[in-house]
């Protein structure tokens, strides 16, 4: 049985659980895990004051969080291997700075999903907040590797200053996608907000839906209309990951816009065009 941490009752005061790391609790007993200190508001308390703990992660290297954890922050921080599942909602900073392993959320997430992550995979079967895969304020780079898959909607500044990796959003996305993007790929399948790619240096932002595609900034220039070969390989990878993709996306053509020419114009925005 996987190590299971169950929230007894919903809290309005945030609980920060970055001290509950899979590589540290893997061989601990449930009582030892319950005695681990977590941050509750402005004080430290033991995990057991709010959560029931059962099972062990020793056999399958898996940790399960159960309940409405929308006020539980920093789940999966620094994850390097194994799997974390959240059966419910998750709070801010899910998977921040993780280097490997997998996090699956069967619910919604707060802001900063995968902030400054370096590897591994996060799959949210719901919605996410702002700043997915983004850099922390004052930092130099956002995510530098790995995959973040959001089945539902996401907020503003997705991929802010990302350096490498893949972000896919199945639903709507907010404003300033790929702001200051250094490299990497962001795929959007739903409606979009405004000002995508502002300040981007390299990388790809692809809008694969047909509804409410964004206007490109004046600092982007139309290049051509074509069928990107590399995009098909990414789409096949996403389908293997269990990400829903319609058949028409594979054979569509895309308008390529190069920019941001305030940053040498080496990035690209791809806009899917109607099949003819």
Image (cartoon, rainbow, N blue to C red):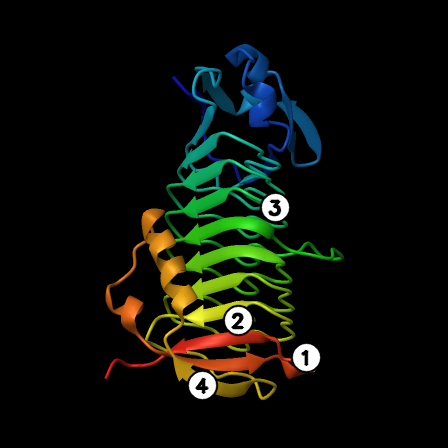
Count residues near mark 3 (Cα–Cα under 10 Å), then give few for <14, some for 14-19, many for 20+. Answer: many
Count residues near mark 1 (Cα–Cα under 10 Å), then give few for <14, some for 14-19, many for 20+. Answer: few
In the rendered structure, which disc, 4 or 3, sits on the residue that comes first in sequence?
A: 3
Query: What is the C-alpha distance between the residues marked 4 and 1?
Result: 18 Å
Judging by the rendered image, the residue that carries numbered circle 2 is 175
Closest to the camera, between mark 1 and mark 3, is 1
Locate residue 133 relative to residue 52 in the image: left or right.
right
Q: Are marks 4 and 2 in contact (CB under 8 Å)?
A: no
Closest to the camera, between mark 4 and mark 3, is 4
Disc 1, SS: loop
Question: Which residue lies at the image location 61% right of the left edge and 16% below the top edge?
Answer: 35
Query: What is the C-alpha distance between the residues marked 1 and 3?
Result: 26 Å
Judging by the rendered image, the residue that carries numbered circle 3 is 118
Query: Which percent across, then down, holds residue 68?
Result: 43, 37
Label placed on residue 264: 1
Query: Which percent across, then down, holds residue 137?
Result: 72, 57
Count residues near mark 4 (Cα–Cα under 10 Å), then give few for <14, some for 14-19, many for 20+. Answer: few
Residue 61, placed above or below residue 14: above
Q: Are marks 2 and 3 in contact (CB under 8 Å)?
A: no
Q: Is residue 175 visible?
A: yes
Image quarter for residue 265? bottom right
Q: Are marks 4 and 3 in contact (CB under 8 Å)?
A: no
Specify the farthest residue to the right.
138
Query: What is the C-alpha distance between the residues marked 4 and 3?
Result: 33 Å
Closest to the camera, between mark 2 and mark 1, is 1
Disc 3, SS: loop
**Is 162 or 89 nearer to us in this picture?**
162
In the rendered structure, which disc, 1 or 3, sits on the residue that comes first in sequence?
A: 3
Image quarter for residue 32? top right
Label placed on residue 224: 4
């Amino acid at each position: 049985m996987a190590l299971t941490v169950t929230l007894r009752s919903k809290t309005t005061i945030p609980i920060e659980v970055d001290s509950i790391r899979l590589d540290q609790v893997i061989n601990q007993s449930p009582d030892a895990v319950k005695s681990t200190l977590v941050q509750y508001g402005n004080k430290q308390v033991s995990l057991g004051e709010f959560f029931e703990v059962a099972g062990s992660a020793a056999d399958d290297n898996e940790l399960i969080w159960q309940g409405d954890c929308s006020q539980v922050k920093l789940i999966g921080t620094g994850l390097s291997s194994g799997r974390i599942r959240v059966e419910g909602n998750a709070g801010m900073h899910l998977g921040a700075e993780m280097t490997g392993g997998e996090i699956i959320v069967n619910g919604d997430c707060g802001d900063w999903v995968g902030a400054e992550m370096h590897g591994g995979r996060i799959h949210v079967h719901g919605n996410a907040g702002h700043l997915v895969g983004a850099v922390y304020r004052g930092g130099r780079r956002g995510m530098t590797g790995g995959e973040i898959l959001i089945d539902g909607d996401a907020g503003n500044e997705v991929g802010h200053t990302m350096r490498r990796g893949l972000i896919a959003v199945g639903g709507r996305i907010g404003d300033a996608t790929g702001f200051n993007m250094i490299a990497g790929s962001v795929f959007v399948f739903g409606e979009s907000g405004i000002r995508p790619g502002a300040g981007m240096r390299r990388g790809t932002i692809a809008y694969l839906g047909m509804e409410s595609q964004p206007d490109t900034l004046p600092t982007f220039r139309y290049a051509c209309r074509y069928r990107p070969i590399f995009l098909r390989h990414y789409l096949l990878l996403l389908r293997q990951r269990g990400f829903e993709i319609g058949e028409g996306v594979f054979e569509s053509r895309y308008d390529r816009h190069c920019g941001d020419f305030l940053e040498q114009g080496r990035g690209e925005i791809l806009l899917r065009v109607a099949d003819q």
